Amino acid sequence: MFETNSLQAILHDQLHIPGKLLTSYTKLGLNETEVVLILQLIHFFKEKNHFPTPSELATPLTINEEHCSDILRKLIQKDLLKIEQKENAKGQISEVYSIEPLLVKLYQEEKEEVVEENNTGTIFILFEQEFGRPLSPFEIEMVSAWLDEDKISPSLIKAGLREAVLMGKLNFKYIDRILREWNKKGIKSVEQARNASRQFHRHQKVNQAVQPQNRDTSIYYNWLEGED
């Protein structure tokens, strides 16, 4: 039977860690050794040691001090750990580790995922607004395929829709070509898509400026259209 003092000691020895760290660490490019080192840091923080040495951190682990130093350096380079200066009540300055960047990335990512999920539900409405009519079953299936099979983010699909509107070619075949071309070029974010669009339209203006007005431009290749 446990004594009260023993039970209190066990309760005091508990470590509070972010659950999101255990479920999403791979999304931040972390491996299991790096996660365990972060848990060691949290443990030392709990013991009021906010700047443990690599030797102290490595002692209970299966990695050596040098390996521990390398991991700490990589965590700082990945912007998941930082070293801050802290002033105590006596005005003395000391260095401390902070995992605040890690926590920000963990929970900012969660927030963005929630926003993305909400966008998924509204993307069909946006298409219907732009087309001015309900989508056909085939068109709904095509949007679903972009989302589920091609894993294209709702924000990038919306960017493709905006590009089609800008080009005056509002049809699903054209939007599909835009998205396939972006995928081929490794474009994954809206910002990358905007840059590609600016370059394309800048190139179009240059071509129009150097071509005689009465020249047939139908033979010129439109990178957004591609071939059937």
Image (cartoon, helix red, strand yellow):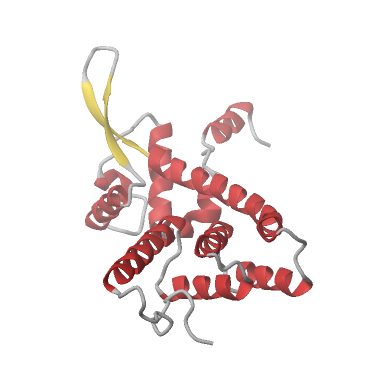
**Residue extending farthest top:** 90
Count of numbered circles in the view: 0
**Residue extending farthest front:** 214
- Of the pair 38 and 145, the residue shown nearer to us: 145
Q: Classify residue 153 as left or right of residue 219.
A: right
Q: Is residue 12 above or below residue 59?
A: above
- Of the pair 81 and 58, the residue shown nearer to us: 81
- Of the pair 42 and 24, the residue shown nearer to us: 24
Q: Quadrant of residue 204?
A: bottom left
**Residue extending farthest bottom:** 228
Task: Please name the residue shown 60% across and 76% down the image.
Answer: 173
Q: Position of residue 123 (x, y in %)?
A: 66, 57
Q: Classify residue 111 as left or right of residue 54.
A: right
Task: Please name the residue shown 39% across and 79% down the image.
Answer: 217
Classify the position of the C terminus by image quarter.
bottom right
Classify the position of the N terminus by image quarter.
top right
Q: Classify residue 142 as left or right of residue 58.
A: right
Q: Position of residue 83 (x, y in %)?
A: 27, 37
Q: Quadrant of residue 53?
A: top left
Q: Position of residue 30 (x, y in %)?
A: 41, 58
Q: Is residue 78 above or below residue 133?
A: above
Task: Please name the residue shown 61% across and 32% down the image.
Answer: 7
